[in-house]
Image (spheres, rainbow, N blue to C red):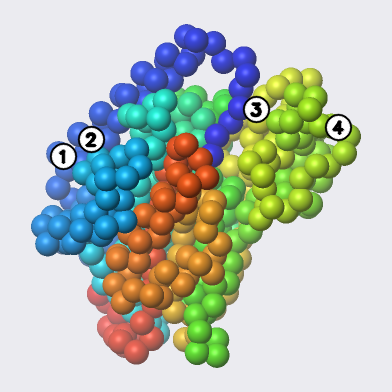
Amino acid sequence: MGCVNSTASKDALRRSELDEETSRRKSERLIEDKNSSFVDPVTGEVHFVGAENIADDKNRKDEDMDRINKKIGQSGPLTSAEYGRRIVSSEGVKNVTVPNATFSMKVAYVSQRGYYPESLNKANQDAFCFHHKLGGTTDVFAGVFDGHGEHGTPCAEFARDKIPELLSKDPSIAKQTKKALFNSFVTANAKLHASSVDDSMSGTTAISAHLRGNHLSICNVGDSRAVAGEEKGGKTVAVDLSHDQTPFRADECARVQKCGARVLTLDQLEGLKDPNVQCWGTEEDDDGDPPRLWVPNGMYPGTAFTRSIGDHVAEKIGVSAEPEILERTLESSTKYIVIASDGVFEFLPSQSVMDMVTSHEDIHDAALEIVLESYRLWLQFETRTDDITIIIMKLDWDNVASPSAAANK
């Protein structure tokens, strides 16, 4: 993901490169220095963030490298070892008891720092989290945040930290979950504007899954995605739980135009195509020049999404932090919940992702396979890859503690 700014100066680019190098070194120090546990021994909370490996399973690391070797080999721009250093993962499957639910859960994640040949040390702008018993409640919260722009990494990390914090402190969440989720996104956006992070031309998408017992709420701004794996007729069918918010959607396009945005492709902006005639089809037919948002009399910000957290300049032409929220009660037909950044879904449709999930008994192996295949497809069609992040939650309806026991764990 990214923003287009044709007026960026050489000094700004140098500052950007310096910021990226500083962020990279900070991330490396976190990976090397932190020794966090998946389960907090005091609170019992499962919590991970995207800056560190949380396990030290040598056998699992060796198995992962074997898979990377088979998929990556010595072909492409990176060796297997170089690629492996870009990976952060759960290094295995984590068992989670969901309080008051009639299922138990297994969780795994993989995140890969993108490959940019012109900026090999660019920091991973994806951030992610998983909270069990969020803030001392019985709630489960998982989120993926895909940063963009010069300061995309701190924007994504801010949202990753602030949204769960706001949720855990909101007294309305017990009875008005949808309202609390909505407010957490909008308030996090306002607090990002007021923070020391420069979000004028940077921001982040946010896709989250909130669980209280069997009740699921999906909250989304941007073009990251949530997908359920539903058992139907002996097959696991992918059901999108969110809808990408881009100008490809007629309703979103009309909304931002009403706010003053010009919606044009780069070819239209540069006069190669008629700006008065819509030249794009569907997102599936995207030819690499998607419709973007521009101020009325300028060549910025160039966002290819219509909602985000941050992006203060784009906010003036309709880019909104107000999330779309889907709520549903989970039934035993729901076998998986997947949330991932658009680094996964750029070239893989939801059903292909779900087919890869179900082809593996071990969901960590599935997550790694999906990230590896996404990386391969990016390089098949582009000279670079996006950051790629996925969290897979597998629901086990046959192996669950009683509700009272689960609530006390």
Residue beneath label 3, please? Answer: 301
How far apart marks 3 and 2 lie (CA) works out to 31 Å
**Mark 4 residue type:** Asp
Residue denoted by label 1: 32
Q: Measured from the top left, where is residue 28 in percent x and y? A: 23, 35
Which residue is tagged 4?
Answer: 274
Name the N-terminal-most of marks 1 and 4.
1
**Which quadrant holds the C terminus?**
bottom left
Give 10 or 294, whichever is nearer the viewer. Answer: 10
Question: Can you tell which of label 1 and label 4 is closer to the viewer?
Answer: 4
Q: Residues within 10 Å of mark 2 (few under 14, many from 20)?
A: some
Q: Which quadrant of the figure has residue 55?
A: bottom left
**Vertical side of 352 occupied by 315: above or below:** above
> Residue 264's spot in the image, x, y percent?
76, 34
Residue for point 14% across, 39% down: 33
Q: Nearer the viewer, residue 296 or 217?
A: 296
**Amino acid on which disc 3 is placed:** Pro
Question: Is disc 3 placed on a helix, strand or loop?
Answer: strand
Tag 2: amino acid: Glu
Which callout, 2 or 4, points at the residue further toward the start of the chain?
Answer: 2
Seen at 24% across and 54% down, the residue is 69
In 3D space, how far apart are the residues under numbered discs 1 and 3 (Cα atoms)? 36 Å
Camera-nearest label, 4 or 3: 4
Q: Residues within 10 Å of mark 4 (few under 14, many from 20)?
A: few
Q: Decide: marks 4, 3 in contact (CB < 8 A)?
A: no
Kindly identify which residue carries mark 2: 28
The front one of 381 and 326 is 381
Disc 1 element: helix
Kindly check if marks 3 and 2 are in contact, taking CB atoms under 8 A apart as contact.
Answer: no
Q: Say which quarter of the image contains residue 314.
A: top right
- Identified by mark 1, the residue type is Glu
How many C-alpha atoms fall within 10 Å of the one at disc 1: few (<14), some, or many (≥20)? few
